[in-house]
Every structure is written in C-alpha cells, then in structure tokens.
Amino acid sequence: MADTPLNQRVLREHVASVYFNYNATFLARVVFVLVLGTFMYLQLGDPMVLPFVVLHLTLYLGMYFTPRWNPSVPAADSAWWARRITRIVTLLGFADALAPWIFVPAGNLPVTAALMVVMMGNCARAVQSLRPLKAALFGHTLPMMGGLIIALAWQRDSIHLFLAAFASIYLFLMLRVGVQEHRLLADSLVLRFEKEALAVRLEEQIAATERASQEKTRFLASASHDLRQPLHAIALFGAALENELRGRPEEVNAQRLMRAVNALGASLDIMLDISRLDAGVVTPVLQAVQLDALFLPLNHTFSAQAEQKQLQLRVRASGLWVRSDPQLLHRMLSNLLDNALKYTARGGVTVTARERGEFVWIEVRDTGIGIAPEQSNRIFEEFYQIDNPGRDRSRGLGIGLSIVQRLSHLLGHPVQMHSRLARGTHFRVVLPASAPQAGALAGAFPADAAAPQQNPRLPRRAAPALPARVLLLDDESEIREAMTGLLRSHSIDALAVADEAAAAAALRQASSEKRPFELLMCDYRLADGVDGLDVGLRLSGRQQGGPTIPLLLITGETSPDRLQRVWESGVPVLFKPVATDSLFRMMARAASSERAGI
C-alpha cells in the first residue's frame, strides 16, 4: 500500500467511506419510500403511488444484491468502483425526481410542503453520505432536487415559484457545503498519508542510522583488535629491550620507542572506552562525592599541561558534595578540561562548582577559540574537531566530547554548552547535590588519579609478590616470544603454548613435577575462533569446582557483545597493548587474591 500513488490511496478511502454506509442507506431508503408512498396514497388516493413504490423497491433490491466494494479490492480499481456507485446513485436520483411530478397537485399546498420537507431532508442525507465522492454527490442531488424545482415552477403561480426559488437556494447551499467538506476530507487524507509516508521514511532512516552505528562499532572493534595484536607484541619486546638496556646509552632510544607505543596505545584505549560505553558494560556506582577531593587530582593532572602552554589553570574549592560515580565523573571532567586546554592559546581555564537549589553546577570555562553556532551540534560527534583539518595528533582524536556525552547519559548529568566565537566556551555539568558523608572522601579519588600522599609515619603495605611461574596461552608466536622474554627478564619462569591441548599437557606435567603454575594468562580470541574465556575457565579449574589456578585474561577485543561477556564472567582482564607496570600489577593482584582465597 505504501507504494500506491497518493491519489489512488485517497480515492480508495473515499470509496470505502461511501460503501461503509451502504446497508444503512439501503434500509433508510426502503423505509423512506414505504412511508412516503403510504402517506401520499392516503392523502391523494392516486393509483400512480403503487408503480412509484414498486419502481423504487426494485432499484433498491438491485442495488443491495449487486457486487459491492470490499477492503480486498486493489487500490488501482478504486476509480472503477467510484464510477459504479456514481451511476447507481444517479439512477436513484432520477427515480426520486419522479415524486414531485406525481405528488404535487395544484392547490394542495400541505402535501406539496410535506413533499418538499421530505425531499430536502433526503438531499441533506445524500450530501452527508456522498460527500466523499463529488461526482456521486452531484449525480444524485441535481436530478432529485432539479425535478422538485422544475415541478414547482411548472405550476406558474407565485407561491410555487417562491417554493422553487427556495429549493434552488437550498440546493446551492447544500452543494456548496458538500464540496467544502469533500475538499476537507481529501486534504485530511492527503495529510494523513503524507505523515504516514514521513513516519515510514523516518523509521527507515532510524534503522539505517542504527545499522551504520552498529557497522561503525564493529569496524572500530575489528580495527582496534587487529591493531592491538602487533602493538602488544611491540610493547612487550620494547619493555624487555628497555629492561635489558637499562643503564646503557641505548636506553634512550628504547624509552623513545615506549613513549611512541604508549601514545598509540592511549589512542586505542579511547576507542575501547567508546566500545565499553556502547556495550553497556560500564555500570555507575553512585555515592556521595566531595568535589574538592575530586578537583585536587584534576589540578595535579592538568597543571603541567597548562604551564607548558603558558595558560592559567584555576580549580576552585567549593566545599560542595554531589551524588555521582567518582571514577566516571573524574573521566568526564578530565575530558572537558583536556578539551578546554587544547583549544585555548591565551588566557586560561577555570573550573568552579556552584550550588543551585537541589543541584550543583560544575562549570569548565576557557578563553579559547570558541565554537560557531553551526558547529555546536557536531562537537559531540566521534572524530569531529574544530579547526583541525590536518588532524594534528597533539589535539587528540576528537573523541573526548563524545565520551562526555555518553557519560552524561549514563550518569544522568546533563551537559550544557555556551560559546562565543573567538571569546571562549564554557561547559556546565548539572549534578544532584548530596549531604556530606563521613568516609566518602576515599571514594572520590579515581584509581588512576593522583591520590593523597600516604602518611610517612604509618607502615607501608608490602606490594603483592609476582607469581614465580606463569603459563601463557596465546596463538600468536610473536606475542608468546615477547611475553616470555619480558617475564624471564624479571626472573619469572614463563612457559608459552599455542592451544588448549598444549596448555592442558603443561598443567598435567607441572602437577606431576610438583611445580605448579601460579598464574594462567590466556588470550581471549584464539586461533580458529576458539573462545579464550571458555578455554581459560576450563584450564583454571573454575568450571570443575576443584583446585583452581588464578586466571588473567588478555585481549585486544573491543566488540561490545564480547566485552559484555567478559565483564559478566568476573575474570580480571587487561587490554592490549598492555603497559609493563599494569601487567605486573594485575599479575600480582590475581596471584595474591588466589593465595588469600578470594
């Protein structure tokens, strides 16, 4: 039906409307002719009443038993059905036109007046039921009322001429009303079908947008995974090389290599953040957060960047508390601060918090280049950057504000933006206020932020010991060689295997030699599509309920569906390329948790 031309769809609705009252019209006309015939016969005793009634009943029965339009009729046939009903009602109109010639006797004004009332009422009913089809409307009312008007005028006396004129005016007004209502019906149908067409196109556009978004997510996940694999090997080789060259002149080049690797890894991590948010695996933990405790690490993190650009960075204390997730709020504000510093050449950036009733406004203001009104709706798009056609890497990837928008929706913290071109921009984050709570200060410091210095008078906690023996399962030979080289350079006995069978054999041999592995590290995506999470769970003994080996998952996967599955498993995970300190910290944590029975 959506492919049917608009005029055919409108005509189909008109025909359907007329046929909708088909049975009611038939019954009304039968009652009408019987009552009229009986009345006229009693008043006039004219023998012509009987043929008149028989003629009309014959026409009505023929109309009732002839084939009718039904909803299964194709829209293309609507014109034929419209002509058919027009011919039928026109024939009935001529039949009704016989009444005044039979029942308007000279000098009998009461009968004439009664007949006029009946026929004018019939005309009004016809206009009401036939207005969807203008041809049918005219085809029925003109013969019927025309016969009445001519029959009245035929008497030639003043009273009948007056009645003829009155009937003519009435016919004109009724036809005018019928034409206006027909036009209104047609316009309303056109508007309805146009809205339906727009709704269909909108659904198609939404579906196309969703497909494009899914394809983009899949592309980013695949590209990120394929880039992370070799980069992970480079990072491992580089870390091992840096450790071997420590104290030698060549160490400088190794450090430069690792800085480049870390920069590329940071870019891939930003893509990972997008995938994690799209996957819905990030769940906010709302709590009372002291903003001053959150602003302190922000100031520590970005003060060096501001000094390097000779900008003033003011992060003002407020004493306010909000209800939010400290980790995610820190990331949100970090992205806003980083974006402000990148696009500010003179002046500075100010971070303030103000109480507004039940809410707190956190505002990040800069004196940067500003944002043109036509660009204000695009700054939250991925990879969109203002005034950076050359894609200067020092100004990032253009994903920071996209992450801010996603975090805004996740946390329920609306973000407002006001900007003046060449004058600066300020972003406002609206958060629910919270009452101060004892013990909430520690929760305000994200794990990756600068935390308060430990009291030197308190004894330091001993760092968890690294596992002495590690089994690595990875299908890529370069990564196996790089990882074993790095671990052995740090005095860790490492064995690397390529598949589950070799890993199972190594575990059995280690058990028989009484030299068990203290940690199993497993890649998530193994050769031939084998799921490393399932393999790791089987090898570690978690699915059997017996003795277990600590399991650490390492992956370059960023697909939202697979990320969701990893997070639901509860297995600790590192994302390629893995920094050396992060790798050792996670290895020690996983091994110590197993020793403690956690």
Image: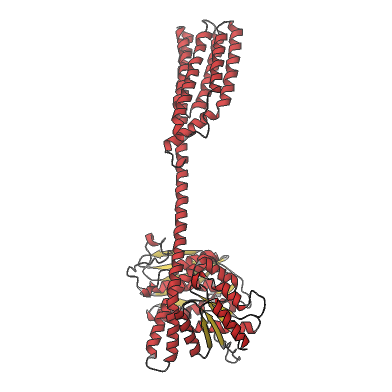
Relative image position of residue 387 (x, y in whole percent): 34, 67
The answer to whether residue 265 shows anywhere in this view is no
Q: Residue shown at 53%/15% (left/top)?
A: 116
Name the foreground residue: 566 vs 277: 566
Render colour scheme? secondary structure
Q: Residue 13 at what x, y percent from top left?
A: 49, 34
Q: Residue 546 vs residue 54: left or right?
A: right
Res 457 quadrant in image: bottom right
* Number of marks present in the image shown: 0
* Quarter of the image that includes the C terminus: bottom right
Q: Is residue 245 above or below residue 547?
A: below
The reply to whether residue 33 is in sight is yes
* Residue that sits furthest to the right in the current view: 546
Query: Above or below — where is 310 with respect to 248?
Result: above
The correct choice, above or below, for 276 with respect to 503 in the image is: above
Q: Position of residue 237 (x, y in %)?
A: 43, 84
Asked whether, in this view, residue 258 is left or right of residue 25, the answer is left
- The outermost residue toward the bottom is 247
Q: Nearer the viewer, residue 159 or 105?
A: 105
In percent of the image, x 43 and y 91: which residue is there?
Answer: 244
Which sits in the foreground, 152 or 283? 283
Q: Position of residue 461 (x, y in %)?
A: 60, 89
